[in-house]
Amino acid sequence: MAARNKPYDQFGPYILFKKLETDSLGDLWRAGRVDGTQLGPTVAVRRLLGGNRAAISANAQSVAQLLPQLSGTSFARDQVVGVIDGVPYIAYSYAGGRSLRHIIDRARGGNGVAPNPLPIDQAIIIAEKVALSLATTAELRDGGGQRLSHGALIPQFIWITDDGEIRVAGQQLGSGLMESLGDQKVSADIARYFAPESRNGAIIKNADVYSLGAILFLLVTGQEPPDAATASAFGAAVRAAKSMTGTPVSDDIRVILDKSFNLDPSMRYGSIGDMKQAVSALAHSGKYSATTFNLAFYLSNLLKKEMESEALDREKEAKVNVAPYADVPKAAPAPVAAAPAVAAGSMFTAIDSPKKSKAPLAIAAVVVLALIGAGAYFAMNKKSAPLQPQANVAAAAAVPPPVKPRVISEPVAVSATPATGTMSDEERRKKAFEDAVEAQVRSKKDAEMMKLQEVFIAELTKKQSKNAPVISTPPSAAPQEDDRNTPSAAQLDQQRRETTQPAEAAAVPNAVTQTQAPAPAISQPVNTPAPAAQVAGLREGDVVDVGSLDSIPRPLRPIAPVYPTIARQQRIAATIILTAFISETGTVTDVHVLRGDPRFGLNDSAVRAMRGTRFSPPQKDGKHVKTWLPQTIEFKP
């Protein structure tokens, strides 16, 4: 279906980049969403091609309004359910990862691939997060006041990202999937995850408990849940099951399986909330100590080849020409304004406009455009002369502000640096364009960094102002100043020496202050920047706002953060914004993370890099002072 000018297939507003999974229900794609005439965010698109399409489509359209209620760390991010060209689909934000269905299949091994069993610790962590998602859904209510339930919990709808996040999708699609169980292939794949009574149309409040029990069975054993056709065979299969490593299932896990993965509804947990509490208690009992970090490390080994090839593929996908996919008439600019609304609507239902109706619209738009262009031409001929100097003056006046933000050094740790010695003309042109775009992005990032710095300084100033009354020095300082008029000159000099020396040793530049510096201030490395009024009596070692410095601190050697191994292997990109307290000698005495990324030690690496860097001393009015210097560090795979 891909045309010469379309290297990838298209599905409504989505460009289908890479097929990730295929099963009886349909296929899963890594895709790019077309937003107007630009490439939007990368998403995962699961097309439900199998089963009863009509029933699934009707189900999808009926629950589309409920999705905005599903927000939280356990739900698929930015989830959309809809129908395009008669094909129901689910789409959600993509940040790497695979479905639980794919992960378990890979963990089993086969076809020349050695098994890589999912550790029990991590199986419990996944079950706990899925239970949290189901319990959160059960707290929501529909328009009629009825509690919601997932109703369609299958491995295909559980997503695990590269960094170990577990998110659940496909909420409320149970009725459509139930109607699809008449398809033998679909039934063989997913029927065992639905409670037997719900397959007959009965509404049972703890049906999700059975489904989660089936998922827990899959996670622990690596085997598909047994068929519920025969009660005796079902019970025997559950009791005989072993873990993926061949060891018996522990008693604490088996207790939860007996009270969830049970054919008798009365023997199950009363609600998904009760089961969630049981799974959480198991996860935090001390016997199982896995974390999302451990899960991320496991996935990096299990899906190593896929992750490596995906990084290369996504670089190509990011450069795709969106114009052929946007389907916007080039001759008429008017429809462009309406394009976003059409794109947004097509996420839920795709409505194709008849081609015959486009011709009159295009002709009318061209005529209107011509009239507007003619009017603009005559207007510009009359007014362009006086307006140009004003525009130039405005542009010239706008040049100094970009100099105002402090210079930001952005050391980048790259796993592999491509050689740039031989660049073709096309590559140079592309590089120049990318540099121009990067410059615009950089200015926005710098403005954001300075805003975070201002918030930090304001909070710091507020903290010190609250603590100021506690200091007992000011009462004793006042009499000293009153007595300065009475002693002799020698005594006055002696008093000044006694007060200034502790102040320099303490190195606490309070705003505008006199030379008061009590000993306890030595343990306060965090200081507020001096206000503008301090400039009148500026001294060595005072704190000055970085925006008021005559000489901004410069690193004497490049800031060299170490890319954490796991983050590099998983090609994790992150931007860390921090601020460092630079002393009058150029040493870093304190570092605060203004906005970071807690994954894989990225924050710690950035902080260590700043602490280990020596800077040129900050200067103001010829004096060496102290300052808080904001710094951005980007980790790019």
Image (cartoon, rainbow, N blue to C red):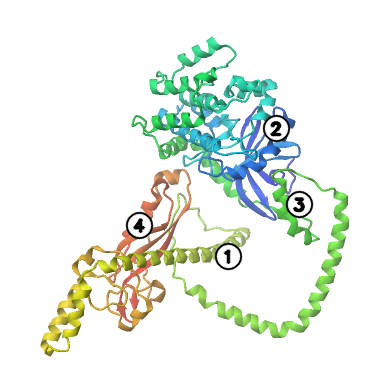
Mark toward the start of the polypeptide (2 vs 1): 2
Q: Give the distance between the C-alpha atoms of the residues marked 1 and 4, in whole angstroms.
A: 28 Å
Residue 161 left/right relative to 18: left
Q: Secondary structure at mark 2?
A: helix
Residue 222 appears anywhere in the view: no
Mark in the foreground, 2 or 3: 2
Task: Name the amino acid type tagged 4.
Answer: Ala
> Residue 177 occupies which quadrant of the picture?
top right
Mark toward the start of the polypeptide (4 vs 3): 3
Q: Give the distance between the C-alpha atoms of the residues marked 2 and 3, in whole angstroms.
A: 28 Å
Q: Secondary structure at mark 4?
A: helix
Q: Is residue 431 above or below residue 137?
A: below
Mark in the foreground, 1 or 4: 4
Q: Position of residue 252 (x, y in %)?
A: 39, 23
Residue identifier under label 2: 56
Mark toward the start of the polypeptide (1 vs 4): 1
Q: Is residue 147 above or below residue 525?
A: above
Residue identifier under label 4: 609
The residue lying toward the viewer, choosing from 69 and 103, is 69
Q: Residues within 10 Å of mark 4 (few under 14, many from 20)?
A: some
Residue identifier under label 1: 436
Mark toward the start of the polypeptide (2 vs 3): 2
Task: Name the amino acid type tagged 2.
Answer: Ile
Q: Give the distance between the C-alpha atoms of the residues marked 2 and 4, in whole angstroms.
A: 53 Å
Q: Secondary structure at mark 1?
A: helix
